[in-house]
Amino acid sequence: MTNLLRLLKLSAKSLLLHPLRSGLTVLGILIGVASVVWLMAIGEGISLASQKQIASLGAKNIIVRTIKPTTDRFEGGGYGVTRDDYDRIAATVPTLDRTLPIRELEQEFRNGPRKLEGRLVGSTGDYAEMTRLRIDQGRFLTAIDLEKEINHCVLAAEVADHLFPAGDALGQRVMIDKDFYVVVGVAAPRAASAGIGGSLAAEDYAADIYIPITTFWRRLGDTIISIKPGQFERNIIEVSQLTLRVREQGDVLKTADLIRDTLAPHHRLKDFAITVPFELMQQARTTQLMFILVLGLIAAISLVVGGIGVMNIMLTTVTERTREIGVRRALGAKRRDITGQFLTESVFLAVVGGGLGVLVGLACRPLLVAVRTVLFQLFPLQMESLPELIREVEPVLVFWSIPLAFVISALVGVVFGVYPATRAAKLDPIVALRNE
């Protein structure tokens, strides 16, 4: 133990004789270790954010959306999921726990002179639970609202703030199309969701109003007429989306296949798309592993570059201290003593660099947030144009990456220090003593 402490003390003194050179070598290892921790943390943060978006759709949910066919040959302008499809799936798929039909339409909402363009959503009372919509005031739609086709509505938070800025929206009336609807609830603010997959577009819940889907079908019907200069378009859409919940998560994939087989014979034009969040989550986890592997490889390259720096410095040190090596050998030092000294110095450099790199790595989140804040202040337009995932991603430390990076840095010191140490030990004492 005493010999080890003496060896460490001697190594530290030798390295401090050239502080700038030793400092730059430590910096190379520091950057490599910090890169491992930072890249792993950023990769984990991006991956978890993506999985969170997918999970918000429900791991047990299957989403069937109406899409417009690529061909214009659809009868009478009608396409997509129908009420018959809804009844057929509910009656023939035994693994389903709940079925939620949704009808969406862009509409203008009015309260006296105040107007707002938004999305009118016809749904059932299960909508709030299945889409994780929280109610801030009042209540959501009920079975009685649907059964009696009552003109009740629930407003998104921003709609309530815009149409009723001076008072409580509950009990007030909103004009939609040509009818008045009584406000029975106000939803809590909710962030927009990003588009997931080719069949599920991004959704902004800020300008939504929710009404019973039975009221929607009776009051607004299925026909959408679009009139543009020189163009008249008539479409018939019965159901915009079906959200289906499976009883057991293990049945999700086979239930999705069954639903696809049930709908396919009735939709020759391929006017529907099925999204399975559970399947997307599995793909996201696989992508996460590949992403972390690639980032780890990039960071490992930084460590190797740092190791090359250690070897270069130690070879230079051996050349400069050739006479010292000769004197020590002449006084009785064995080859293993010389090897141990120079190997200890290289490992010392790597361990110090690794320790500092870990500390810098632990500061990943606050440093990244600070840099992002500064960039938002200096380049607001450019930062706002970036995808939301990049603008708001939070690094998540992968704790096993910290000891891994530190151990690798120590191994780098050993691997890249062996050759210089061996070369020093093999010097002929007589030749070394003649060196000036």
Image (cartoon, rainbow, N blue to C red):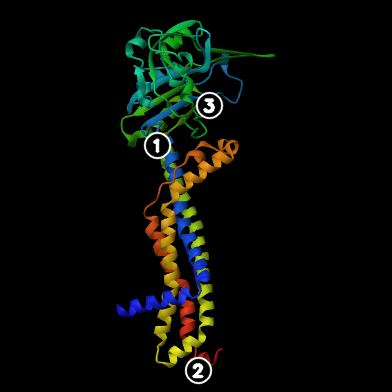
Residue at the outermost right position:
230
Amino acid type of the residue tagged 1 in the rendering: Phe
Picture quarter with the C terminus: bottom right
Question: In the image, which disc is placed on residue 270?
Answer: 3
Mark 1 nearby-residue class (10 Å; few <14, some 14–19, many ≥20): many
- Badges 3 and 2: C-beta atoms under 8 Å apart? no
Q: In this figure, what is the number of numbered marks?
A: 3
Left or right of residue 409, residue 374 in this image: right
State the image coordinates of residue 284 (x, y, percent, origin top left): 44, 42
Question: In the image, which disc is placed on residue 430?
Answer: 2
Rounded to the nearest whole Å, what is the CA distance between mark 3 and mark 2?
A: 87 Å
Q: Tag 3 or tag 1, which sits nearer the N-term? A: 3
Q: Judging from the image, what secondary structure is the residue with disc 1 in?
A: helix
Residue at x-position 38% and y-position 30%: 61
Question: In the image, which disc is placed on residue 278?
Answer: 1
Report the mark closest to the observer, 1 or 3: 1
Amino acid type of the residue tagged 3 in the rendering: Lys
Report the mark closest to the observer, 3 or 2: 2
Mark 3 nearby-residue class (10 Å; few <14, some 14–19, many ≥20): some
State the image coordinates of residue 73 (x, y, percent, origin top left): 60, 20
State the image coordinates of residue 227 (x, y, percent, origin top left): 63, 13
Q: Tag 2 or tag 3, which sits nearer the N-term? A: 3
- Residue 262 seen in render: yes
- Quarter of the figure with residue 410: bottom left
Amino acid type of the residue tagged 2 in the rendering: Ile
- Quarter of the figure with residue 62: top left
Picture quarter with the N terminus: bottom left
In the rendered image, the vertical position of residue 397 relative to residue 82, given as above or below:
below
Rounded to the nearest whole Å, what is the CA distance between mark 1 and mark 2?
A: 73 Å
- Badges 1 and 2: C-beta atoms under 8 Å apart? no
